[in-house]
Image: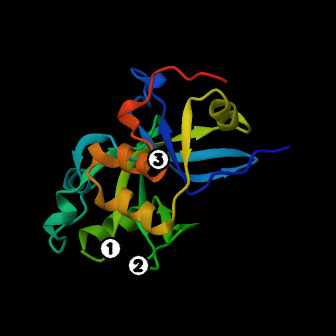
Amino acid sequence: MTAPFLKNQFLLAMPSLAGDYFGGGILYLCEHNADGAMALLVNRSADLLISDVLSELDIPTSNAPASTLQAPVLVGGPVQSEHGFLLHDDSTDADSMALGQGLMLGSGRHLLEALGRGEGPQRYLLALGYAGWGPGQLEEELAANVWLSCPTTAEQASEILFDAPLSERVQRAAALLGIDFRLMAPQAGYA
């Protein structure tokens, strides 16, 4: 029997990953199907602001609100870490892939230019890189207790992705499961 696909859920890195690339991380699953999975790490700053990225790409920012220019850029994952991905709401008809739950994912320069003009989506995050898994790989990691999957509603996902401070995102997602993630043991046991 095949495990259900987990698209539009959060993955919480179990405490056993402390010290690993994903240690302390929360990922949002943008895709999960028989071909594999793709997610963005959504709680780690790349120590850049959107204004830095726009400046580097010579994109004018004269009409961009300060909140856009001062928004942090995130480390999205180790795959294509030089490539930007904009996870955003569906408030604009941007040429992005619809993910469901009112979310879209795009990666074109036109999205960054729209942010610079102050015409981009209302809610968004910019991440450099992504996390990817081949067929069955994520399922194996879930069975090995590497990740805790967290189903979410559209409203819950939006609140965590766009409103919660980076440092609180793991705990807020865990709270949806009724868990205080700070109390989790680093090793998983089997009964």
For badge 2, the amino acid type reads Ser
Residue 41 lies, with reference to residue 14, above or below; the image says below
Give the image location of residue 119, x and y in percent: 30, 77
- The residue at the point 59 percent across, 29 percent down is 145
Please name the amino acid that badge 1 sits on.
Answer: Gln
Between residue 96 and residue 25, name the one nearer to us.
25
Instruction: Name above or below for residue 191 compared with residue 182.
Output: above
Please report contact status of discs 1 and 2: CB closer than 8 Å, yes or no.
yes
Above or below, 149 relative to 97: above
Q: Which mark is residue 94?
A: none
State the mark number for residue 122.
1
Q: For the residues marked 2 and 3, what is the alpha-carbon distance in whole angstroms?
A: 20 Å
Q: Earlier in the sequence, mark 2 or mark 3?
A: 3
Closer to the chain start, of discs 1 and 2, is 2
In the displayed orientation, state which residue is furthest to the right. 1
Which of 144/133 is in front? 144
Mark 2 neighbour class, 10 Å CA radius: few under 14, some 14 to 19, many 20 or more? few
**Residue 117 point in image, percent of width and height:** 25, 74
The CA distance from mark 1 to mark 2 is: 6 Å
Q: Quick one: SS at disc 2?
A: loop
Residue identifier under label 2: 91
Q: Secondary structure at mark 1?
A: loop
Helix, strand or loop under label 3: strand
Q: Amino acid at mark 3?
A: Leu
Q: Nearer the viewer, residue 170 or 58?
A: 170
Q: Residues within 10 Å of mark 3 (few under 14, many from 20)?
A: many
Disc 3 target residue: 40
